[in-house]
Image: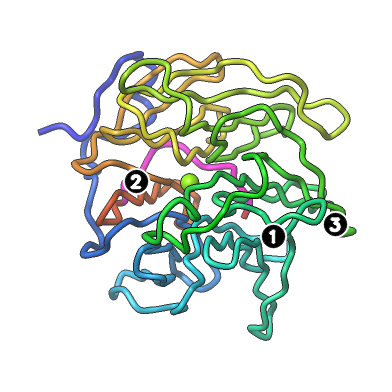
């Protein structure tokens, strides 16, 4: 069987026919938020319903943090510290070098955030996160609670100022900047264009802020949850049937086929050429012939 579906011939140069899509860990309930720690040789990821952050190494999986406050998405800041979205405490946190936890954001204009979902850090050190309501809709991935704010995308300045920068989306979820940060991509898992698609918006940046968004691509079958960018500026997105590779113009170039619904992805490994894939109950990995540009 092939692990890949080539739609645009260019995609053939992005994957290697002899590199398998491997299940590297399984037995979870809903995994998200993979983040690579090359210095520690491990991948951290969230098993949200089981309220834990797990650590994968080639030797196996161990528990990194439990309870995790139903953590979802993670990244690292420019100092390499872990930055996490927590559903249960409705906040974004940073884990310091000594292991203590600092709250980066938990409210906006006096109202509690919903359930921060995905987070990225820009080159100026600002922390950007999405705040859909998934973690407070039920008790499955957090605590069922009243929604106090619309589902925005926020930017937290290094001085701590929090600003709602995208306020007109339905359920903003995955975030990624283009390699030169001239464009911000945001996946929306809330708005269905057809019965089984979800869309990704592109926002050109001006003065460090997003301008009006435009439709970039409709992911079908949908699970446009997590997105990452490679060194050619292509956007890789989670989907219901695997991972889709989109050109900077928004064309579908190819798919990595995964037997479970994919939630999030991240590049890692020695040259950021491994793609780690969290997918429902399992984590998969595949070596690509491209390199990720995400920080770190
Ligand atoms: Mg997400």
Q: Main secondary structure of the magenta part?
A: loop
In the image, residue 227 above or below residue 97: above
User: Within 8 Å: ligand 1 and the Cβ of disc 2?
Assistant: no
Disc 1 is placed on an element classified as loop
Q: How many marks?
A: 3
User: Are there few (<14), some (14-19), or many (20+) residues within 10 Å of tag 1?
Assistant: many
Q: Is residue 291 above or below residue 90?
A: above
The answer to which of marks 2 and 3 sits earlier in the sequence is 3
Residue 77 image label:
1
Question: Which mark is nearer the camera, 3 or 1?
Answer: 3
Q: Nearer the viewer, residue 11 or 249?
A: 249
Magenta run includes residue 87: no
Q: Say which residue label 2 marks.
A: 287
Q: Which residue is mark 3?
A: 158
User: Which residue extends farthest bottom?
Assistant: 98
Q: Earlier in the sequence, mark 3 or mark 1?
A: 1
Residue pictured at 52% horizontal, 27% vertical = 234
Q: Is residue 206 left or right of residue 128?
A: right
């Amino acid at each position: 069987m092939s692990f890949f579906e080539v739609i645009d011939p260019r995609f053939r140069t992005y994957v290697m026919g002899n590199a398998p899509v491997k299940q590297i860990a399984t037995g979870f309930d809903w995994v998200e938020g993979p983040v690579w720690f090359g210095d520690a040789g491990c991948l951290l990821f969230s098993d949200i319903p089981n309220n834990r952050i797990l650590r994968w190494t080639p030797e196996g999986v161990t528990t990194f943090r439990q309870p995790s406050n139903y953590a979802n998405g993670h990244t690292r800041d420019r100092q390499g510290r872990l930055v996490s979205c927590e559903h249960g405490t409705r906040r974004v946190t940073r884990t310091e070098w000594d292991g203590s936890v600092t709250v980066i954001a938990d409210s906006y204009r006096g109202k509690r955030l919903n359930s921060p979902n995905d987070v990225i850090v820009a080159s100026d050190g600002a922390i950007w996160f999405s705040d859909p309501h998934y973690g407070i809709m039920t008790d499955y991935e957090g605590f069922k609670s009243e929604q106090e704010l619309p589902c925005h995308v926020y930017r937290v300045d290094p001085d701590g100022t929090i600003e709602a920068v995208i306020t007109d989306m339905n359920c903003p979820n995955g975030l990624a900047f283009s390699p030169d940060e001239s464009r911000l991509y945001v996946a929306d898992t809330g708005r269905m264009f057809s019965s089984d698609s979800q869309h990704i918006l592109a926002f050109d940046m001006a003065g460090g802020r997003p301008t009006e968004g435009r439709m970039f691509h409709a992911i079908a079958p949908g699970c446009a949850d997590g997105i990452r960018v490679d060194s050619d500026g292509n956007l890789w997105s989670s989907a219901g049937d695997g991972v889709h590779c989109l050109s900077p113009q928004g064309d579908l170039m190819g798919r990595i086929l995964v037997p479970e619904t994919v939630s999030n992805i991240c590049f890692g490994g020695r040259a950021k050429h491994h793609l780690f894939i969290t997918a429902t109950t399992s984590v998969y990995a595949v070596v690509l012939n491209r390199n990720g540009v995400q920080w770190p």
